[in-house]
Amino acid sequence: MNAQHLPKNIHGWMGDSVGYWEGDTLVIDTTNFSDKTRFRGSTENLHVVERLTRVDDKTLLYRFTVEDPDTWDRPWTGEYTWPATDQRIYEYACHEANYALGDVLRGARQQEAEEAAKAKK
């Protein structure tokens, strides 16, 4: 691991992440969360280690370990696979074009048309 974490007194909303390789696994170590970052009751002592490993040509294994001695008795771990896709992938929180908005408006216009049709009967 070449990069070092920021000093413990510097906190980021999403923590301070440092990535490095362990063989063929990308490890992302995140510490220094702020007191505003709340994950299932965690505190600023939250520590998350994520590992991404290519299982085969079309699959990544994502494994994470979460610890916060002020919240949980011991660290806990979860994992799941990410299959390859040919589809476009957009960041969840926002992306450059809000494709859902068109569907929301189409749905609203459809609902208005159905209500107008009922009113005519």
Image (cartoon, helix red, strand yellow):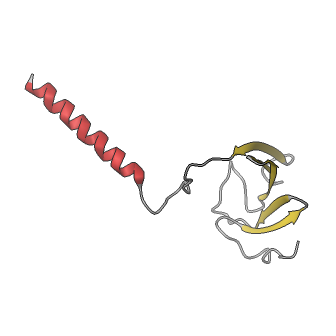
Could you tell me which residue is drawn at 63 percent across and 62 percent down? 36
Judged left or right of residue 102, residue 70 is: right
In the rendered image, residue 93, in percent from the top left (x then y), is placed at 53, 56
The single residue placed furthest to the top in the displayed view is 121
Task: Answer above or below: position of 105 versus 98.
Answer: above
- Position of the N terminus by quadrant: bottom right
Quarter where residue 76 is shown = top right
Could you tell me which residue is drawn at 78 percent across and 43 percent down? 79
Judged left or right of residue 93, residue 45 is: right
The single residue placed furthest to the right in the displayed view is 23
Quarter where residue 33 is shown = bottom right
Mark yes or no: residue 93 visible.
Answer: yes
In the rendered image, residue 2, in percent from the top left (x then y), is placed at 87, 76
Quarter where residue 48 is shown = bottom right
Could you tell me which residue is drawn at 24 percent across and 41 percent down? 109
- Position of the C terminus by quadrant: top left
In the rendered image, residue 3, in percent from the top left (x then y), is placed at 83, 76
Could you tell me which residue is drawn at 73 percent across and 58 percent down? 43
Mark yes or no: residue 67 visible.
Answer: no
Between 74 and 76, which is closer to the camera in this rendering? 76
